[in-house]
Image (tube, helix red, strand yellow):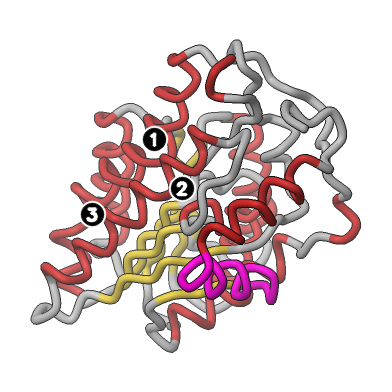
Amino acid sequence: MKDKVVVITGASEGIGKALAYQFAKRCKAVVISARDSFKLQDAEADLKKINPGILSVVCDVSVEDDCKKLIDATVTTFGRIDVLICNAGMSMRALFNDTDVSVIKKLMDVNFWGTVYATKYALPHLLKSQGSLVGISSIAGKKGLPGRSGYSSSKFAMEGFLETLRTENLKNNLHVLVACPGFTATSIRDKALSKDGTVQGESPRNEKVMMTADEVAVAVFNGVVKRKRDLILTANGKLTVWLNKFFPALMDKIVFNHMAKEDDSPFK
């Protein structure tokens, strides 16, 4: 990986920043992007302590032109792209019946269209380098989660998009990895949207029992090195996918009951 150039969206904190550290320690260059310029500058300064080949680009992935500028800046500076990690994402928590449609659209714009836009401009370079396209998805992209209609929808869409690209490029040696962490101790739940689009605030889940962003980043790095197809990073996640394949009605009940136990759950 020492000569590789890596692009990571949503890299100012959480899983994205952890990914940037893992790749920065081993790769030639890492390009990080996020909407928050101040957090992005802080992340860039931290990363340059271990790798001078760090470039930060302010980018709102829901804006197509921002994604084009991100890819153009990478190629202009480093001449190539070997890995694109579509990590930028946001969540929600509310019953669909109570949710403003604008909330669903916002999640689709970031989680799905952000992946599409970045991939559209990076793909010619990834094909040239026979590189890796990585989508940070979720078990919510395998099983619809109650109270997360927009989040599950966006992750299902992301996975369908990436699976299609993998199949289209079977003869082009493009590596496509879909990584599905379990619940991870990051700020994504603190920033999740409520039914009217406002930020929900404090996480309803116990962060202490979740996997860490660093654990996710190590697994994704190894998945890129080994050119794996899929990563499901928890035993519960693997069990959920397996049971849902053979016993979907049972899994509906299990998932409902599990999610209903959250503090202030929107359903019981």
Q: Residues within 10 Å of mark 3 (few under 14, many from 20)?
A: many
- Residue 258 in percent (x, y) is at 76, 51
Q: Residue at x 56, y 30 (%)?
A: 37
On whether residue 241 falls in the magenta region, the answer is: yes
Counting residues from the start of the chain, the first of labels 1 and 3 encountered is: 1
Label 1 is placed on what type of residue?
A: Val
Query: Which residue is outermost to the bottom?
Result: 226
Q: Answer whether labels 2 and 1 touch (C-beta < 8 Å).
A: yes
Label 2 is placed on what type of residue?
A: Thr
Q: Secondary structure at mark 3?
A: helix
Label placed on residue 9: 2
Separation of marks 2 and 1 at Cα, in angstroms: 8 Å
In the image, which residues are magenta? Answer: 233-247
Q: Answer whether labels 2 and 3 touch (C-beta < 8 Å).
A: no
Q: Which residue is mark 1?
A: 61
- Residue 170 in percent (x, y) is at 14, 78
Label placed on residue 122: 3
Splitting the image into 4 quarters, where does residue 153 fall?
top left
Q: On screen, 141 above or below 153?
A: below
Splitting the image into 4 quarters, where does residue 135 fall?
bottom left
Label 3 is placed on what type of residue?
A: Ala
